Image (cartoon, rainbow, N blue to C red):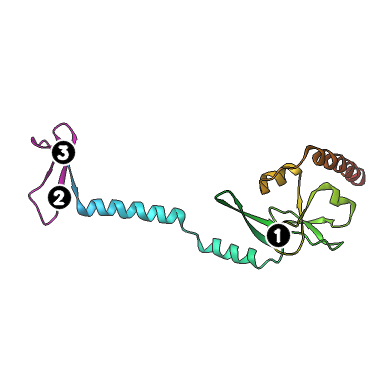
Amino acid sequence: MSVSGENSIRSLNESERNYMRADDGDHFSVITDTTANESLNDQLLQHKHRHKKSRYSDMYDNIKSSDPDYHKITRREGDVKIKTEVYSTSIMPGTFIRDAITGYKQQDCRVGSWKEDLFFKVHEASGYIGTQSYVLFYDSPEQFERHMKASVSTNSKRIWTDKFARARDRLEKEQQ
């Protein structure tokens, strides 16, 4: 449709409230309030759908929060709040070692056994979880650093690596 005149003009049909907008030079396209609103509603629904928590997410959160070893830590780093989810392990000998990030219980590794040395163990006593002291088990010091946004000294890493190597050697001998 070619119309000469201004860049943007209103059509004569007031009931539909059609608008004509210049695309290139003298070529105009017709936009109605209805199509503009539908497009806006579609965008809002898509945004809402992307950011809406699903009911399954709520159910999952309820299941996690009913676990006594699940904890949500909230810390402040300047003006930013950092939320971290962790799973703790009881210090009672014989308890299954639990992965601090996933919550998976190692069926063949128990607290107090030599297999405890296969994990990087952290005693959480900062007060972020509560008044009790908790034990967190990680695959390595680096995994702990990434998860908790903390740093471990080089000396502590070296000591753990030596202990881990001895435990891994023992595990390999047992499996032969």
Does dot 3 land on a helix, a strand or a loop? strand
Checking the image for residue 28, the label placed there is 3
Residue behind mark 2:
18
- Magenta part of the protein: which range? 1-27
Name the foreground residue: 7 vs 42. Answer: 7
- In which image quadrant can residue 123 be found? bottom right
Residue behind mark 1:
127
* Residue at left offset 11%, top offset 35%: 2
Residue 11 in the magenta stretch? The answer is yes
For badge 1, the amino acid type reads Gly
Distance from disc 1 to disc 3, alpha carbons, whole Å, reads 66 Å
- List the single residue furthest toward the front: 78
Q: Is residue 151 above or below residue 43?
A: above
Distance from disc 2 to disc 3, alpha carbons, whole Å, reads 12 Å
For badge 2, the amino acid type reads Asn
Name the foreground residue: 82 vs 43. Answer: 82
